Image: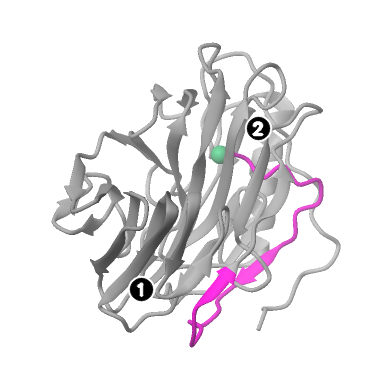
Amino acid sequence: MSNQEHAPEELICDEAPATGIEVLSPRDVPLGGPRALQVRRTLPQKQRSLIGAWCFLDHYGPEPVNGAGAMDVPPHPHTGLQTVSWLFEGEIEHADSVGSHILVRPGQVNLMTAGQGIQHLEVSTAATSVLHGVQLWVALPDTDRHTAPFFEHDTPAAVQVGDARLQVFVGSLLGSTSTVRAFTPLLGAEVVLDPGVVLDLDVDPAFEHGVLVDRGSLAVAGTDTPTGHLAYVPPGAGTLGLAAGAGGARVLVLGGPPFGEQIVMWWNFVGRTHEEVVAYREAWQAQVADRTDGRFGVTAGDLAWIPAPPLPNARLRTRG
Ligand code: MN
């Protein structure tokens, strides 16, 4: 996924945990192109930029793919983060500059560690009639953010817990552990609840959590959270209560200890300073100009690479 906003803001993210539960509303963002797939972005936003190391959450579909609504994101760069693709429906082709070429399918986690720099493309396949999923970004800690890029793929086991089913795609929950690598303590899981089911998840009290409602509605720690919204739960509790409504619910549970580092996010880059982000942009633009190898490597194929948007005129101040 590429941030396709025409004039993306530079965000300085370092907020402290909140004291109570927040219900964050999604905002609609076109993913680019005249017949763009529309995504619902719940992170980052004015109220909150980070949940643990999770720093970006785009939710899309279910959207019929018939020309419009397709995912068509040509090669673009990333630094300082990991991307996590998780699908509910459809199929996406992923290729990147470390030589990965894979089909992303429902129930399979695909995690790309950008580290010092990578480029990749994501295109929904011709076999896809409906596209429905999320893309998440994870900020890398300062100690690991210059690591060499790599790509991981895994199919986490589906586990039945009472009247709920879950798949843990990052970290550990209820005895299930993902095989993909996280650089800070982190949780990402899909949980499907039958109608009316109440589930008290044992969670790490050092973690703050986010619960994205993909389908249905539910109460998160007693707070009603509508479809498409993200409930934020501050650290401190050893259980996370999920109570599904009459239609049941499918949610993503995200978590991690408060990240504790100030990051600068702009376009597809995570860095620590404005100057660093400017240098990432210059390195990418130099590769685009001559279609050459460099910091981000080269993805196989002949698709045009996405040039970086202009930098904002003003540097933003820290929020909050
Ligand atoms: Mn991307």
Q: Is residue 12 magenta?
A: yes
* Segment tinted magenta in the rendering: 1-23
Position of 125 relative to 49 (above/below)? above
Label 2 to label 1, Cα distance in Å? 37 Å
Lower position in the chain sequence, tag 2 or tag 1: 1
Q: Is residue 29 visible?
A: yes
Please state which of the two labelled residues, at mark 2 or mark 1, is closer to the viewer.
Answer: 1
Q: Quadrant of residue 35?
A: top right
Q: Position of residue 100 (x, y in %)?
A: 39, 25
Local packing at callout 2 (Cα closer than 10 Å; few below 14, some 14-19, many 20+) is some
Toward the bottom, the furthest residue is 19
Residue drawn at (52%, 34%) of the image: 132
Position of 74 relative to 252 (above/below)? above
Q: Secondary structure at mark 1?
A: loop
Tell me the kind of residue under disc 2: Gln
Residue drawn at (30%, 63%) of the image: 198
Q: Where, quadrant-wise, is the N terminus in this rendering?
A: top right
Which residue in the structure is indicated by mark 1? 257
Does the Cβ of the disc 1 residue fall within 8 Å of ligand 1?
no
Q: Position of residue 28 (x, y in %)?
A: 72, 49
Q: Quadrant of ligand 1?
A: top right
Residue contact between numbered discs 2 and 1, judged by CB atoms under 8 Å:
no
Q: Where, quadrant-wise, is the C terminus in this rendering?
A: bottom right
Which residue in the structure is indicated by mark 2? 287
Position of 60 relative to 246 (above/below)? above
Q: How is the image coloured?
A: one colour
